[in-house]
Amino acid sequence: MMEIKVIGIGGIGCALLPFLARYLNYRGERVRITLIDGDEFQRSNADRQAFGTLGNKAKVKAAELAREFEGLSFRAVPEYITETNIARHLQEGDTILLAVDNHKTRKLVSDYCEKLTAMALISGGNDFTDGNVQIHIRQGGRDRTAPITRFHPEIRDPQDRSPAEMSCEELMERGAPQLLFTNLTIASAMLNAFYSTCEEKLQYGEVYLDIIEGKSNPLKREGEREP
Amino acid sequence: MTEPLKQAQRVRPASPTGTQETVRVIYGVHSLDANVAGRTVGEIRAALRQALNIGPQAVAVVDGQEVKEGFVLQTGEILEFVRLAGEKG
């Protein structure tokens, strides 16, 4: 069974999930999609995030998708990813779509993925009108593309904090303004990378996108070179 | 190199082609071909900082490997200043 883990069900996660599920539902494979997020949906996020009811984002979205796509299996994990629980939620062979809002969690997931023998990590992030997607592929214990920390010191040595480390007040106040269209652009790029990875046709390890300039730039990020 | 690069062409979208007489410099979605062969990464960063809006923390990469500010570029090489990753989601 193909195991897909979607970490972070915010603006990007909400945008990519319905299309990911629709694509997989009609592909005819056995697939389980696990949604992981400890956050609660609030009405103040409704300008970018689509949830039918208030409640934990992973639970609400998993229930909505299960009703619409009966051919897939959905599981909700209403937790933030932490050092304590990451081994419970990420396993060998997983495809991980990482759509969180902080570099601390990106580093945590990336470091863990580097210990796995085989996995695909597709990580997306944005600022207001631009962003990027990084793809780290490991096969047979070797990096086929570079880990997401390799050329990004801001992820390797994050200055921010995971939401698991914040108080309720900090969680309420966090967050720079974001634009729905940028979330959608990054979600689309993550799905493009997902498709290319599944088809073993991926030709880049990172792609930058800018919605004002209407540009994207895919770049190679080579993994380990053959000895 | 203290004066702006007069030879630098205008900023344009990245494309797979480049001339062999120049160095291709990339930052995020931007790319340009410039006659900067023989100059160091630090010199090129200083010269193109404004044209490409290169951040001071951007890691320099040539041929898939991180290089230091003193690295000298050769014709036909591609120098990328790695733009910071988007943080939000």
Image: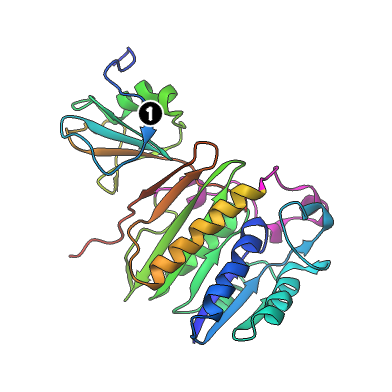
Residue bearing the label numbered 1: B11
- Of residues A154 and A214, the one nearer the viewer is A214
- Secondary structure found at label 1: loop
| Residue at image point 73% right, 75% down | A64
Any magenta on residue B23? Answer: no
Q: Residue A19: x, y in percent?
A: 58, 68
Residue sticking out furthest to the top:
B3
Closest to the observer, A18 or A101:
A18
> Quick one: A216 or B72, which is closer to the camera?
A216
Using residue A158 as the reference point, say whether residue B24 is left or right of it.
left
Q: On the picture, is A81 further left or further right than A222?
A: right
Three-letter residue code for mark 1: Val
Q: Which segment did they paint magenta?
A: A151-179
User: On the picture, is A222 further left or further right than A120?
Assistant: left
Q: Quadrant of the N terminus of chain B?
A: top left
Residue A110 visible in the shown view: no
Query: Residue B29 occupies which quadrant of the picture?
Result: top left
Above-or-below relation of A147 to B73? below
Q: Residue at x 34, y 61 (%)?
A: A145
